[in-house]
Image (cartoon, rainbow, N blue to C red):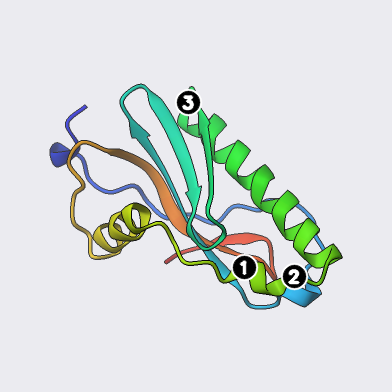
Amino acid sequence: MNAKNKSLPRKTDHSIGDMNSKNLAKKNIRCIVFREGKTWYGAALELNIVESGDTAREAMLLLFEAIVGYLESAEKINGSSVLNQEADPEYERMWQSLVSEKKIPSKEIFFFGNINADKNVLISA
């Protein structure tokens, strides 16, 4: 698929489950699900989590599960500082291109948006 001829995906709202995150209040986690070659990847920029799958939906599901597990573990150890990691430069550039509505050649984007760790809901960027 030629990414230059495709419009950007829509940002949508999705619940990712019930999680008590009172210690992680008001933290947005930027996420991107994209294909490189035949593999789909899901990346959570602020957590430096990357999951892969055979389909976009599989990569997104694995990413959401990893985020939930990561946040639950952080809450158990009162590790809110682990949420403020510096994003990988490649994913940061990709995010900046997406939010400025530029096409990203060589990558097919399935989804990009924010997860609000306090509400467990994907929100628009």
Residue at left 22%, top 45%? 7
Please provide percent x and percent y for residue 5.
14, 38
The vertical placement of 47 against 62, above or below, is: below
Residue at left 31%, top 25%? 37
Task: Specify the label residue 83 is tagged with.
Answer: 1
| Quadrant position of residue 105 | top left
Q: How many marks?
A: 3
Task: Specify the label residue 117 is tagged with.
Answer: none
Question: Gap between marks 2 and 3, in whole Å?
Answer: 32 Å
Q: Are marks 1 and 2 in contact (CB under 8 Å)?
A: yes
- Indicate left or right for 11 with 9 as reference: right
Image quarter hosting the C terminus: bottom left
Please provide percent x and percent y for residue 94.
30, 54
Please provide percent x and percent y for residue 31.
48, 54
Q: Which circle's residue, 1 or 3, is located before the other in the chain?
A: 3
Q: Secondary structure at mark 3?
A: loop
Question: Gap between marks 1 and 2, in whole Å?
Answer: 8 Å
Can you identify the residue that label 3 sits on?
Answer: 55
Q: Which circle's residue, 2 or 3, is located before the other in the chain?
A: 3
Q: Secondary structure at mark 1?
A: helix
How busy is the neighbourhood of tag 2: few (under 14 within 10 Å), some, or many (20 plus)? Answer: some
Q: Amino acid at mark 3?
A: Thr
Q: Secondary structure at mark 2?
A: loop
Residue at left 61%, top 73%? 27
